[in-house]
Amino acid sequence: MKKGALIFYIAISAAVLGLYILFFVSKGSESNNVAAAPANAKAVVAYVNIDTIIAKYDMATDLNKTLQDKTKKLEAEFGSRVQNFQREAYDFQDKAQKGLITRSQAEELQGKLQQKQQNLSQQENQYRMQLAEEQQVALRNIHAKIVEFLKEYNKTKGYSVIISTTLYGGPVLIGNQALDITNDVIKGLNDKYTSK
């Protein structure tokens, strides 16, 4: 989950940075339809560390635990089926080596084992796709809640832009700690999450 979340939030950070650049920096391509900020207006920028939010946001922690529990359950279920298949394959091999089954029975059993192996492979792929899809839905839900909270939060704070960054880079490589609102956002998100 961490690798997928990191990739997802790096992509989101890049998109936010791109929008910031397009909207605030590209002065040469301004059109007459866009209202310019007054000359004396200050742009107030804040940033959040998205990795820290994901690590400390109770909703993200709960969804991650749910996904881990489901993964363990599916792995145990699938592992049991694989062990049953391995026992059947060993039993078949043992009987065939000892000459306890006819050639036609061996061919029939071998065909059934190949079909079971194919079914197991398909089931493993289905489990992986299901878990990946659930992980993506969880990430989208977390992201939506963060953005929803930041919109509400910013109504009282009045930032011109809130940028997301990660522990390993992003749009903010070095920033004034006074502009880092991560802990305030985490507290607000968790208060809102636990109040539901």
Image (cartoon, grey):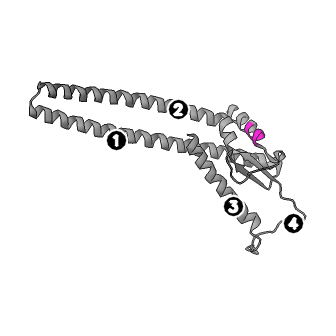
Q: Tell me which label, 4 or 3, sits earlier in the chain.
A: 3
Q: Is residue 68 left or right of residue 125?
A: right
Locate the N terminus by quadrant.
top right
Q: Is residue 73 left or right of residue 181?
A: left
- Say which of 195 and 188 sits in front: 188
How far separated are the C-alphas under marks 2 and 3?
A: 34 Å
Q: Does 189 appear above or below 160?
A: above
Describe the element under mark 4 as helix, strand or loop.
Answer: loop
Q: Tell me which label, 2 or 3, sits earlier in the chain.
A: 3
Q: Does 3 appear above or below 191?
A: below
Q: Nearer the viewer, mark 4 or mark 3?
A: 3
Locate the C terminus by quadrant.
top right
- Say which of 162 and 108 sits in front: 108
What's the amino acid at mark 1?
Gln
Residue located beneath label 3 in the image: 19
What's the amino acid at mark 4?
Pro
**Labels 4 and 3 touching (C-beta < 8 A):** no
Residue located beneath label 4 in the image: 38
| Residue displayed at 56% across by 45% down | 4
Residue located beneath label 1 in the image: 122
Residue located beneath label 2 in the image: 68
Q: Tell me which label, 4 or 2, sits earlier in the chain.
A: 4
Q: Tell me which label, 1 or 4, sits earlier in the chain.
A: 4
Q: Which residues are magenta?
A: 182-186
How far separated are the C-alphas under marks 4 and 3?
A: 20 Å
Q: Nearer the viewer, mark 4 or mark 2?
A: 2
> What is the x, y in percent for residue 140?
59, 46
Counting other residues with Cα less than 10 Å from the Cα at mark 1, is it few (<14), some (14-19), or many (20 or more)? few
What's the amino acid at mark 3?
Leu
